[in-house]
Image: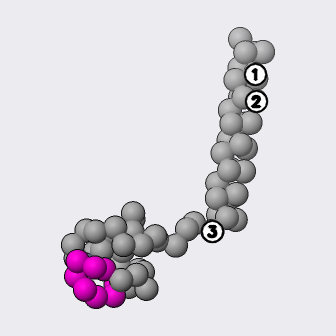
Amino acid sequence: MPWCESCSKLQEDSDLGSGGECPECGEVIGQRRKVPWHFQAMIGVTAIYLVYRLVQGILWISHHL
Ligand SMILES: [Zn+2]
């Protein structure tokens, strides 16, 4: 758990803001747990798939005009 100098107390990881700020004074005191790599990988794969489908769609339309 991160220690907040300003509040002189420990803060729960889960209470920190999205940037690792103390919930009471707003001081950045820690890092929120990083997004798991497999979640990021899944987003990446999904994004690539969507772009691929988009390109396919554009090609299909351009061939059927
Ligand atoms: Zn604080």
First-in-chain label (2 vs 3): 3
- Residue 17 visible from this viewpoint: no
Three-letter amino acid code at the position of disc 3: Pro
Q: Is mark 3 within 8 Å of ligand 1?
A: no
Q: Secondary structure at mark 3?
A: loop
Picture residue at 40% right of the left edge, 81% below the top: 2
Closer to the camera: disc 3 or disc 1? 3
Which residues fall within the magenta stretch?
Answer: 4-11
Q: Give the labeled residue for mark 1.
A: 59
Q: CB atoms at circles 3 and 1 under 8 Å apart? A: no
Distance, label 2 to label 1, CA atoms, is 5 Å
Q: Is residue 64 left or right of residue 37?
A: right
Q: Residues within 10 Å of mark 1 (few under 14, many from 20)?
A: few
Quadrant for the C terminus in the image: top right
Front in this rendered view, residue 17 or 4: 4
Q: Secondary structure at mark 2?
A: helix
Q: Position of residue 5 (x, y in %)?
A: 28, 79
Q: Position of residue 14 (x, y in %)?
A: 41, 80
Q: CB atoms at circles 2 and 1 under 8 Å apart? A: yes
Q: Secondary structure at mark 1?
A: helix
Q: Give the labeled residue for mark 3.
A: 36
Residue 11, placed above or below residue 40: below
State yes or no: residue 36 in magenta: no
Q: CB atoms at circles 2 and 3 under 8 Å apart? A: no
Return the residue found at the far top.
Answer: 65
Q: Give the labeled residue for mark 2.
A: 56
Residue 43, placed above or below residue 33: above
Coloration of the structure image: one colour
Q: Residues within 10 Å of mark 3 (few under 14, many from 20)?
A: few
Q: Is residue 50 left or right of residue 11?
A: right
Q: Residues within 10 Å of mark 2 (few under 14, many from 20)?
A: few
Quadrant for the N terminus in the image: bottom left
